[in-house]
Image (tube, rainbow, N blue to C red):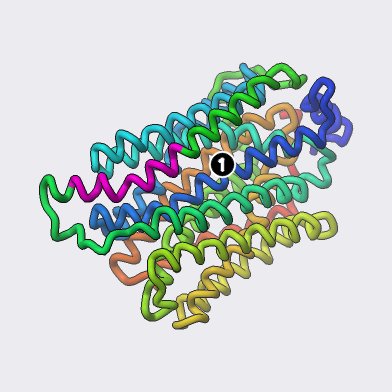
Amino acid sequence: MQTTGAIDREADGMTSRGVDAPDLRWFVFALFFIFGGITSLNDVIIPKLKDLFTLSYGEALLVQSAFFFAYFVFSIPGAAIVRKAGYMRTAAIGLLVMMAGCLMFVPASSSALFPVFLLALFVLAAGITIVQVVANPLISLLGPPESTSSRLTFAQAFNSLGTTIFPYVGAIVILGSLAKIDGSKLQGAALAAYRVAETRTVVHTYLGLALALLIVAGVVWTRRNRLKEAQDQTGSMFHAFTLLTRPRFAFGALCIFLYVGAEVAIGSLIVSYLEQPATLGLSPEAAGKHILFYWGGALVGRFVGSGLLRVASPGKVLAAAATGSVVLILLSANSVGAVSGWSLLAIGLCNAIMFPTIFSLASQGLGTRAAEGSGVLATAIVGGAIIPPLTGHLADIAGLHFALALPAVCYVVIAGFGVFGSRAKAASDEY
């Protein structure tokens, strides 16, 4: 276990020249808000593209595969950039890559081809990956080790604020414009023209985001020299994977994989799930607006959880939250009507503390290897690329209710890590 003095020295290395730590934390909170909000727009885009390209659930959830596969590809390179360029410069680079991804929605719409949309999402996610590799260790190091879970949970609350606001607005702008035309009955030029016209709202949304990202990147770049940083420069870029020899860290990485996969799979299916006559029987726009309750539950839970984690064992809180998610899935899958719909949405509340708590439990004792650890853990976010399409294929085969079994299994494993984390001692930074 890293000593308090070592953590304090690390935190001192992360504070800026002339700017105190609280100011820096608010900067990191803004990053969480931005990448959380943009990520959650996928839940709105999926039903839009499913309708336009006449896709199955499994095919539509390739949106999440394209998006979250970027974490697998760019997390370790992102950590390597942090080691060479520092946190602030890397954040600016990530924001500019995000902007490029947003701009790629213009040629995607013009082409009227689903794979081009997937490519745009992949580039956008590459930028988000780089920004997230910066944000997680930075907020972890800005304070004493005993409050890491609480501090990271509070930061994740701003992520949830973005995931609450963006889908609601996106449902109005994107899903509210769904035409009353059956695209499956169109062919050739007529079908291409229909797709181009119907994706204009998506393009306009992402062009607005591109402008906002350019402004934020400019602000970050002007502050690129204001941080003193201490990074471990030893070893190659892939040296980070030696951290997986630590059982606690490896188990935590697995749970990041499972958690993100389960959370994204459920969020991706909410609109289709609530449209079913057996649940709430809502229109696409109305169902899209209900995503607010899923991510809004995480928002409320993270503010509450931030305080709870100051007085309770993070591992025990994680185990309880994961168990709650399993109970809610079983309730939703085995009921109908409002009970089925609202119990699914309530899973967002249980999700609230999971990512930051798993991350902080896995990262204990990393010290100067924090950026490397963040890169490996961010790589594990690729679970969002694998579990959602598998869940979608289950839905195609046996229905949406049965498909919830896969996220339920993920939460069972996470509950086990909570128990493990409350008992196991973290490896020393001297490794």
Q: Which quadrant of the view contains residue 91?
A: top right
Quarter of the figure that contains the N terminus: top right
Return the residue found at the far right. Answer: 5
With 122 as the anchor, is 15 left or right in this view? Answer: right
- Give the residue at mark 1: 35
Dot 1 amino acid type: Phe
Q: Position of residue 175 (x, y in %)?
A: 39, 58
With 428 as the anchor, is 406 left or right in this view? Answer: left
Q: In the image, is residue 198 part of the stretch drawn in magenta?
A: yes
Answer whether residue 11 is visible to the viewer in this image: yes
Q: Position of residue 53 (x, y in %)?
A: 24, 53
Quarter of the figure that contains the C terminus: top right
With 260 as the anchor, is 363 left or right in this view? Answer: right
Q: Main secondary structure of the magenta part?
A: helix
Q: Is residue 275 above or below residue 13?
A: below
* Image: magenta residue range: 192-207
Depth check, front residue: 380 or 49 = 49
Answer whether residue 408 is visible to the viewer in this image: no
Badge 1 marks a residue whose secondary structure is helix
The residue located at (46%, 82%) in the rendering is 337
Q: Position of residue 305 (x, y in %)?
A: 74, 59
The residue located at (80%, 27%) in the rendering is 15
